[in-house]
Amino acid sequence: MQYAIGSLLGRALAIAGAVAVPGSGAMAQEQVLFVSQGGAYQKAQTIAILDPAAKKLGIKVNQDSAPDAWPVMKTQIASGKPTWDVVDTPTGYCLRGGEQGLVEKLDFSKLPNAAAMPAEYRSDYSVAYEFYSSVLAYSLKKFADAASAPKTWADFWDVKKFPGRRALRNHPIATLEAALMADGVAPDKLYPLDVDRALKKLEEIKPHITVWWTSGAQSAQLLNDGEVDMVMAWNGRVSALTKEGAKVAYTYNQGILQSTSLCILKGAPNLATAIKFVNEAVDPVLQANLPLHIDYGPANPNAFGTGVISSARAKELPSAPENASRQALMSYAWWSSAKGEEAEKRWLGFMQK
């Protein structure tokens, strides 16, 4: 229902702009239809990035929401009449979209803010927009002090030294990376993933996994309710619990740093405006605004030099340089490749055993 309402709103706004009286300000004003994932995240980026970008550029930013944008992207391109312009979606979908002709190839000479970002944060078809991490989280009721708490994925796998109930995500992305780090692979040496080795390591821990979670809310609830003592979870979910006073904690050590990215739909109706908007959306100052409203890290590292983010806040963010250096940066290029798709298929077989 969330998607349907967002879609109707987005279409209504787009139509309203299209039928404005000729010569009116509404007709003259440039606009772009931006699509994100809804909820508190989209509300936060509206305040931090979308509204300021619209004001600075003198454009109208209409919005739609789609928690799973990929099938809609494919449908829009197949129709020959796409209505979306810019999509905020998991980075892998932008890369697959580029391979399948669903998104525009980017000209970084027109995207100076993006061009100044690290090369691994962008591709021919995507620009990283925000970061989050899959982290090792644990109960402070079970592990009362830092000395006794698990700090690495090897600790998570060590059921004798760190007894307790465990949960992992029922998905290969990030889970395979954690398994390889548990088996001794360095965070910066993960790719290409050795899927055989990862699945073998997962076979070791599988009998000790109480729950294979399927949503971020579930992972947080398991930890908060005491159903598990340690879990792989998204940092924002755990930090939300800590703010509510829950006796839980997490570490960025060996976290898997993940991103959503911006990409422009192939044949976007407002292409020129979309390019200007994407560049503005990764402006360092606007990027720095985002973590003031939600527990996600800016994708543009230059955000940490703006003075907007306090040093105390930076320590909490997954993409802060100190925290990022302790983590594995996910390779969406690998996951969007044929090998990545094969790994996803093999995961289903692993879970069905």
Image (tube, grey):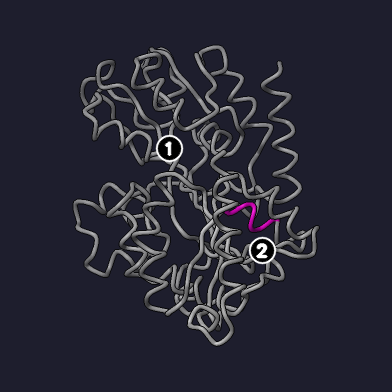
Q: Position of residue 55 (x, y in %)?
A: 37, 75
Question: In the drawing, does residue 270 fall left or right of residue 121?
Answer: right
> In the rendered image, which quarter contains the C terminus?
top right
Majority secondary structure of the magenta segment? helix
Residue at image point 49% right, 43% down: 186
Q: Give the range drawn in magenta.
A: 91-96
Q: SS for tag 1?
A: strand
Residue at image point 63% right, 42% down: 193
230 in magenta: no
* 87 over 180 or under it: above or below: below
Mark 1 neighbour class, 10 Å CA radius: few under 14, some 14 to 19, many 20 or more: many
Q: Which amino acid does label 1 sit on?
A: Trp
Q: What residue type is labelled 2?
A: Thr
Query: Of the residues under marks 1 and 2, which one precedes in the sequence?
Result: 2
* 320 over 30 or under it: above or below: above
Q: Looking at this view, name the residue that lies furthest to the front.
A: 21
Tell me the distance, in whole angstroms, between the alpha carbons under discs 1 and 2: 32 Å
Q: Mark 2 points at which residue?
A: 83
Q: For the residues labelled 1 and 2, say whether their Cβ atoms are less than 8 Å apart.
A: no
User: Which image quadrant is residue 18 in?
Assistant: bottom right
User: Which image quadrant is residue 341 in?
Assistant: top right
Question: In the drawing, does residue 80 fall left or right of residue 61?
Answer: right
